[in-house]
Amino acid sequence: MASWQWAWLLGLSVWGLWASRRPGRRFIGQRSQWFRDWGGWILASSVGSFAPALAPDAPSWLRFGLMLAASLLLLRLAHALGSRVVGYGVVGGLGLIALFLDSLSGSVWARHGAFGHGLPTQSVGDLYGALAILWGLIVCRAWLHIEGNPLGTAYLMSLIALWLGWKGQTPALGWGAAAAALTLSLQVIRRELTERRHMRIAIQNQPVRTVRVAQGYDLAAHGGIFLGVCATAIALSGAPTMQFHALSPDAGWHLATGIVCVAGIVWKRSRRPLPLAVQYAWLVGTLLTALLSIQPLGVVAMGALLYWGLLGAHLQETSRPMSNLPLRTGGNE
């Protein structure tokens, strides 16, 4: 089944590469054309990959059909919300919640999903673990977009690292998630230190709401908590082992998908679909997880694929004036 899934994702990546050649055509602004959002399809398919676990013994075509149906519903949900960034954050959050609950109740989806490890263990495999890190960062992107407290993103990623350190099948997940969480935390704290003398005012309908600004001692306490949680996640993961394993049957799909996505990212390198802090965490978390993983090509392909999907969604949106702040799209600076 995984080969069907990777073939589908490769097709979406190639579609995006072809569609991005014509920047003048924008489909996202047309309500009737939501299904032509190839970037949204990539994200929705990553979460919809759980659906084949509903019928693990069914023929491949039926399992693939279940995945497509679930992805279609998730894509429609993302477009039904007012903001595209928030919509994708909701879809990523649903995938994260589903995988977390599954890990506490038998790990059926983590075993029999399209990216499942297929082993009789109640743990999260490397591919779904890498997706959990990326889904978490997509949720962070949505949280920052709606002017949520940036420290909340650091707490979220630290808790994801703790969970993957506990339930991850290999140490790669705990270490990779902890690296992503620490990278994001350092960026957030640095940003808060530079802004602690500024008053941030958020206007939502009426009246005006004043947000309390974190002080230096507050940030030191938060930093200690982040460091402690990530250290615990690493301790739960155990010592990493860099082993060279035989390539999986899907290694060719991983390589082809990664090459297409990286080509598209390099081509559109002037565009950045993620806040800078989230982008750093995305890169560090993906690379360290891949370095320690038993499926390095698959993890790298996942990271490039979802980034390419977010970049594609960004390219297709109707142009409008956007703030260029590293961490948030509003506020006072």
Image: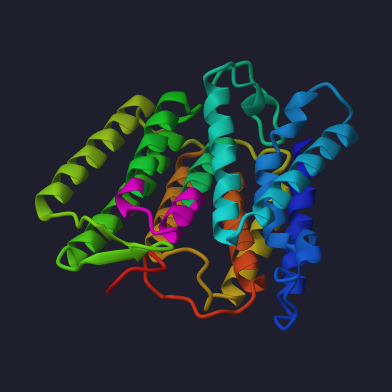
Residue 11's quadrant in the figure? Answer: bottom right
User: Residue 111 placed where, x, y %?
Assistant: 65, 25
Residue 266, compared with residue 244, is above or below; it is: below
Q: Does the magenta stretch include residue 145?
A: yes
User: Residue 24 placed where, x, y %?
Assistant: 72, 83
User: Residue 319 placed where, x, y %?
Assistant: 60, 79
Q: Give the range drawn in magenta.
A: 138-152
At 20% from the left and 44% from the top, the residue drawn is: 222
Residue 279, compared with residue 300, is above or below; it is: below
Main SS, magenta residues:
helix
At 51% from the left and 52% from the top, the residue drawn is: 138
Q: Is residue 232 magenta?
A: no
* Count of numbered circles on the image: 0
At 50% from the left and 70% from the top, the residue drawn is: 272
Is there any visible trace of residue 77 in the rendered image?
Answer: yes
With 25 as the anchor, is 121 left or right in this view?
left
